Image (tube, rainbow, N blue to C red):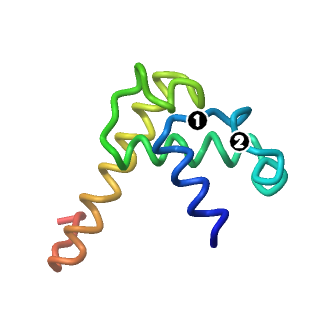
């Protein structure tokens, strides 16, 4: 759990994978770090340019992920309210 907290703090500080201590890098792959950074930036509402995500993925990929996340959130909200998206 302490490692998860350290990873979260590192993302808040816009650290790159290479900035992580060797101990933490041994626990998380580069691909996992990039995926987490992308989701973190989407959750924070960051624009791609100037964010940690710009080093993790391309701009188009980021905004496609942002759109998918928004649609997923909207779908979940509709299900929670008892609406059927097919109707």
Counting the numbered discs, the total is 2
SS category of the residue bearing label 1: loop
Residue 12 is situated, as x and y percent measured from the top left of the image, at 46, 44
Q: Are marks 1 and 2 in contact (CB under 8 Å)?
A: yes
Disc 1 packing (10 Å; few <14; some 14–19; many ≥20): some
| Rendered residue at 74%/40% (across/down) | 30
Q: Is residue 86 above or below residue 12?
A: below
Disc 1: which residue: 15
| Rendered residue at 39%/46% (across/down) | 68
Q: Is residue 27 left or right of residue 42?
A: right
Residue 73 is situated, as x and y percent measured from the top left of the image, at 30, 59
Tag shown at residue 20: 2
Quarter that holds the N terminus: bottom right
Residue 42 is situated, as x and y percent measured from the top left of the image, at 39, 43
Q: Is residue 49 left or right of residue 27?
A: left
Q: Is 19 in front, or is 35?
A: 19
| Rendered residue at 16%/73% (across/down) | 83
Q: Is residue 61 above or below residue 44?
A: above
Disc 2 packing (10 Å; few <14; some 14–19; many ≥20): some
| Rendered residue at 20%/68% (across/down) | 78
Q: Is 79 in front, or is 8?
A: 8
Q: Quadrant of residue 49?
A: top left
C-alpha gap between disc 1 and disc 2: 7 Å
């Amino acid at each position: 759990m302490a490692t998860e907290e350290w990873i979260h703090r590192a993302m808040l500080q816009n650290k790159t994978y290479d900035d992580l201590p060797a101990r933490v890098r041994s626990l998380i792959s580069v691909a996992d770090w990039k995926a987490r950074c992308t989701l973190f930036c989407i959750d924070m509402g960051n624009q791609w340019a100037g964010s940690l995500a710009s080093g993790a993925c391309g701009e188009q990929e980021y905004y496609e992920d942002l759109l998918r996340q928004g649609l997923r959130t909207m779908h979940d909200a509709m299900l929670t309210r008892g609406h059927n998206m097919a109707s």
